[in-house]
Amino acid sequence: MTYTLMSELFVRTLREDPADAEVPSHRWLTRAGYIRRAAPGIYSWLPLGLKVLAKVEAIVREEVEAIGAQEVHFPALLPREPYELTNRWTEYGPNLFRLKDRKGTDMLLGPTHEEMFTLMVKDLYSSYKDLPVILYQVQTKYRDEARPRAGILRGREFTMKDSYSFDATTEGLQVAYDKHRVCYQKIMERLGLEYVIVQAMSGAMGGSRSEEFLAISENGEDDFVRSPGGYAANVEAASIAAPPAQDYSQIPPAETIATPGTATIDLLVSFLNTAHSREGEPWTASDTLKNVVYMRVSPEGERTPLMIGVPGDREIDEKRLEAALSPDVAEPFNDDDFEAYPQLVKGYIGPVKDSTQILSGKLEYRTDPRVVEGSSWITGANEKDFHVMNLVAGRDFTSDGVMDVAEIREGDLAGDGSGPLSIARGVEMGHIFQLGQKYAEALGLQVLDENGKLVTVTMGSYGFGVTRAVAMVAEATCDDKGLAWPRNLAPYDVVIIIAGKGEELVEAASTLAQELDEAGLDVVLDDRSVSPGVKFADSELIGFPTCVVVGRGLADGVVEVRDRTAGTNRNVEVARAVEEILGEVRA
């Protein structure tokens, strides 16, 4: 006997949701006995979970190796030195797990392995004839997430496939990048996930181009935008279209006006519509220029002021700001900072005072794309209870450049001119980067070209979340009864339930289990001494695609076959059961 007895399977199902479950995948994977929480953001995998994880890994390996990648395996415990050379020991900040060995040597738990792959190729290859090469691994990664959540969707320990391409030319990099792009599309299709490919920020990875593969999910934590014309980007990387420059020849000179008690945009607009009403239309927040001040903090801890001007009806999106500044971070201006910069008056901040530029050499000033040349604004005068009207961009003030970090709204125009944007949510499954020569230069990876000259190798990096894929497939296929795996990922093909008492039922179920097992299916025989109702509930909770019920129908020579995904039941003659079930499973 090689089929599995449910009474011997290491699993316990739960009737109640775990207290910390926020999303369906976390709830069902825990209740169905696939994972167990060991610590915040850290999970143990049980036999059912490992079987699904192995099937996801197999799909990923098949598709990656189909484009010529070769598998290697690096340790998770890594030395500091390579990450110091690329500056990521600092750039990763608090997300990096750092530790020391007994000799006091700095070590880390690998969040990703660009440095190690680069050094391996440097150690073994020296000529352009050795290239191109694509290497990959399926490895455990560690990131000290500030807010681990959603079970294995965002944990501090997770399994990822990361592959890296090494080429002597940028043209070769493009070929490798395109191969991975197609490879990831095939993986997502085999997993059965609805997805979108979006432009993304490179962040601490660096590089000139990157795209994310997002599984579309209302429970996703990543917002993305797309337009009717095909533009798609995650919110951090999205750009909006700037309006055209405006004619300001008829706009009066800038004028400082008293605006007592108007330290907020709402109070200012209300005051303007009372004391400075205009014909035709009331003043709105979009007529004002809100200037938000931060302290820009480098990975080394250097603090410099940064002011961002956005239309008053918009808020700054902190995630977009974080992505734009990476590896620097933004901290709010505090009271001590305002004291150090007395020319900036809290609640009345503006880019000028008394018609003179106050920012040059003082702090960095960036503006929203909507602040185009000729646009007129009402903004703070850097004096308590005073604002400036008719302040025209390009005439009365300038900035140090555009920073597109304001919140994006439905209907905003895409930066490439392809139409209005819609916003949806998704989960990042894969991320591909054209790294270029950042890591090769930092670590000295060069080869001799056809002329015998040393050239720096160009690289690509391609990550795919394997444990996250398990969660997303569970998320996409579950229902109100539990998990409902697609057949290619289910831990077992068939569960056979003995629904009643009597040796004849046990004998018939055992015979059927043996025959299906010999035919090549993974079979579970639920032989437990519990009620049929419990067995049916566990079958639906665990998500077996096919359930065969051996019960009272056996007296009439039939068994019941239930399809979990389709939700259908039918009676099948015992003599034809193996043939019928094989046809269903392998359809």
Image: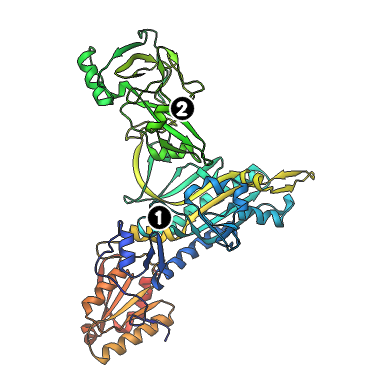
Mark 2 Cα-neighbour bin, 10 Å: few <14, some 14–19, many ≥20: some
Q: Is residue 218 left or right of residue 84?
A: left
Which disc number belongs to residue 402? Answer: 2
Q: Amino acid at mark 2?
A: Val
Query: Which quadrant is the C terminus positioned in?
Result: bottom left
Q: In terms of sequence position, does the residue under pointer 1 or pointer 2 come before the other?
A: 1
Q: Is residue 135 left or right of residue 139?
A: right
Residue 456 appears in which quarter of the rendering?
Answer: top right
74 in relation to 178, above or below: below
Q: Nearer the viewer, residue 286 or 301?
A: 301
Q: Is residue 226 left or right of residue 258?
A: right
Considering every residue shown, the one lying at the far right of the view is 452
Question: In the rendered image, which residue does mark 1 sit on?
Answer: 154
Q: Position of residue 253 (x, y in %)?
A: 37, 8
242 in relation to 496, above or below: above
The answer, for residue 277, to whether it is visible in the render is no
The answer, for residue 393, to whether it is visible in the render is yes
Q: How many marks?
A: 2
At 44% from the left and 66% from the top, the residue drawn is 53
87 in relation to 160, above or below: above
Q: Position of residue 78 (x, y in %)?
A: 58, 58
Give the SS element for disc 2.
loop
Q: Nearer the viewer, residue 581 or 319?
A: 319
> Could you tell me how far apart the alpha carbons at marks 1 and 2 are, in whole angstroms?
32 Å
Q: Position of residue 137 (x, y in %)?
A: 56, 60
Residue 512 appears in which quarter of the rendering?
Answer: bottom left
At 35% from the left and 71% from the top, the residue drawn is 584
Mark 1 Cα-neighbour bin, 10 Å: few <14, some 14–19, many ≥20: many
Q: Amino acid at mark 1?
A: Arg
